[in-house]
């Protein structure tokens, strides 16, 4: 199999596979299976890269369905245990470099002081029917998003290189982005200790679903009466915030398991999503690009914008608006 064919099927280069081999603790703990380590990793990567069941993967790799399940669950656990190594919040020099890259991203039209971009992404799952789930009693309607598709949410924050610097997943598809944000660890820190994790004068860009604070900039609500500079502010913010949409597109385009997860356990869904984000970052670090990008849009309407804005956030937004008026 040529390198091109290999990457087409597994969505990763052979070099990246070798790097994964170096990180994962294999062979499988207490499972006494005489299966080559590299084959175990290929089974796991195939699972992430395609929409196949454990039975189909077992047939493809000439292993039992139960063995396929054991290999994949072990690798998912290992990747999640390593998530803090692959998904890191930039600090010190890395933080400064990240802000500088954002400043150069759109030239003179770049939004100033950007540290990252945040958004939520719906990941399709099996309907959590009561008869086949071990989860606590839940209203299954909670998992249906506005398109009436059962999903769980992935909240991601990315840097200028499209790498995830934070991810939080598992909330039902009907949840509002602002609520998910407030309940996430990073959201709590940004709301209570913003100066600790975001460099002075910098901020994360979000859409109208998020609260406006001094470290989280969102667009002006378009009520039809915005001034020209407010419209330009919104356009400039959206142009720089597009990195999160690009990251989600690359994530789902490469790891097709996320297009529809035949899973209904929340914990298992979260493991798959986190593992995909880890692999996504690993690919970027090793310049393992992939051409296919899934089209993604947050589909947030301005009418559903979050209203809980802070005074400091409003003051800073007006200052940035004035700053942009001098250059746009």
Image (cartoon, rainbow, N blue to C red):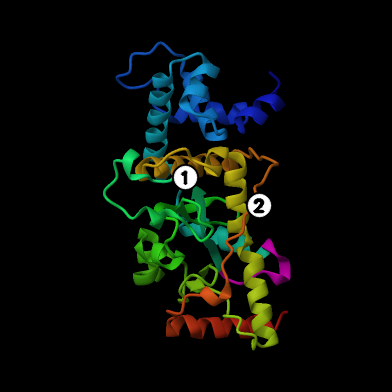
Identified at 71% across, 80% down, the residue is 327
Label at residue 293: none
Q: Which residues are magenta?
A: 105-113
Residue toward you, 134 or 17: 134
Q: Which residue bears the numbered disc 2?
A: 295
Identified at 29% across, 41% down, the residue is 134
Q: Residues within 10 Å of mark 2 (few under 14, many from 20)?
A: few
Label 2, label 1: how many angstroms apart (C-alpha)? 19 Å
Left or right relative to 193: residue 120: right
Residue toward you, 65 or 111: 65
Q: Secondary structure at mark 1?
A: loop
The question of residue 112 being in magenta is answered with yes
Q: Nearer the viewer, mark 2 or mark 1?
A: 1
Percent position (x, y) of residue 274?
44, 44
Left or right relative to 81: residue 95: right
Percent position (x, y) of residue 254?
61, 40
The question of residue 323 being in magenta is answered with no
Percent position (x, y) of residue 156?
49, 55
Is 124 situated above or below 42? below
Identified at 53% across, 42% down, the residue is 260
Q: Quadrant of the N terminus?
A: top right
Ranked by sequence position, the earlier of labels 2 and 1 is: 1
Q: Residue furthest front?
A: 131
Is 158 situated above or below 239? above
Residue 266 is drawn in which quadrant? top left
Label at residue 125: 1
Identified at 38% across, 71% down, the residue is 191
Is 317 situated above or below 87? below
Q: Secondary structure at mark 2?
A: loop
Percent position (x, y) of residue 123?
50, 49
Q: Quadrant of the C terminus?
A: bottom right
Q: How many marks?
A: 2
């Amino acid at each position: 199999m040529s390198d091109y064919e290999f990457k087409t099927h597994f969505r990763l280069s052979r070099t990246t596979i070798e790097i994964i081999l170096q990180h994962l603790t294999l062979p499988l703990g207490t499972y006494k299976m005489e299966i080559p380590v590299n084959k175990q990793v290929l089974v796991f990567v195939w699972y992430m890269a395609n929409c196949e069941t454990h039975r189909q993967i077992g047939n493809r790799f000439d292993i039992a369905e139960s063995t396929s399940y054991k290999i994949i669950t072990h690798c998912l656990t290992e990747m999640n245990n390593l998530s803090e190594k692959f998904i890191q919040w930039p600090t010190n020099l890395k933080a400064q470099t990240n802000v500088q890259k954002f400043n150069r991203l759109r030239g003179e039209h770049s939004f100033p002081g950007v540290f990252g971009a945040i958004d939520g992404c719906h990941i399709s799952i099996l309907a959590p029917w009561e008869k086949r789930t071990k989860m606590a009693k839940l209203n299954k309607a909670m998992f249906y998003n506005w398109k009436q598709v059962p999903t769980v949410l992935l909240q991601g924050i990315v840097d200028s290189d499209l790498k995830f610097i934070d991810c939080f997943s598992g909330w039902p598809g009907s949840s509002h982005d602002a609520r998910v944000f407030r309940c996430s660890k990073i959201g709590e820190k940004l709301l209570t200790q913003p100066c600790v994790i975001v460099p002075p004068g910098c901020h994360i860009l979000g859409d109208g679903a998020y609260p406006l604070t001094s470290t989280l900039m969102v667009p002006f609500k378009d009520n039809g009466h915005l001034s020209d500079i407010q419209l330009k502010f919104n356009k400039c913010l959206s142009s720089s915030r597009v990195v999160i949409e690009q990251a989600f597109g690359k994530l789902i385009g490469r790891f097709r398991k996320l297009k529809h997860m035949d899973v209904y356990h929340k914990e298992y869904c979260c493991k798959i999503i986190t593992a995909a984000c880890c692999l996504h970052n690993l690919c970027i670090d090793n310049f393992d690009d992939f051409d296919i990008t899934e089209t993604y849009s947050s589909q947030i309407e301005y009418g559903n914008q979050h209203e809980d804005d802070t005074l400091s956030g409003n003051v800073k937004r007006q200052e940035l608006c004035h700053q942009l008026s001098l250059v746009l």
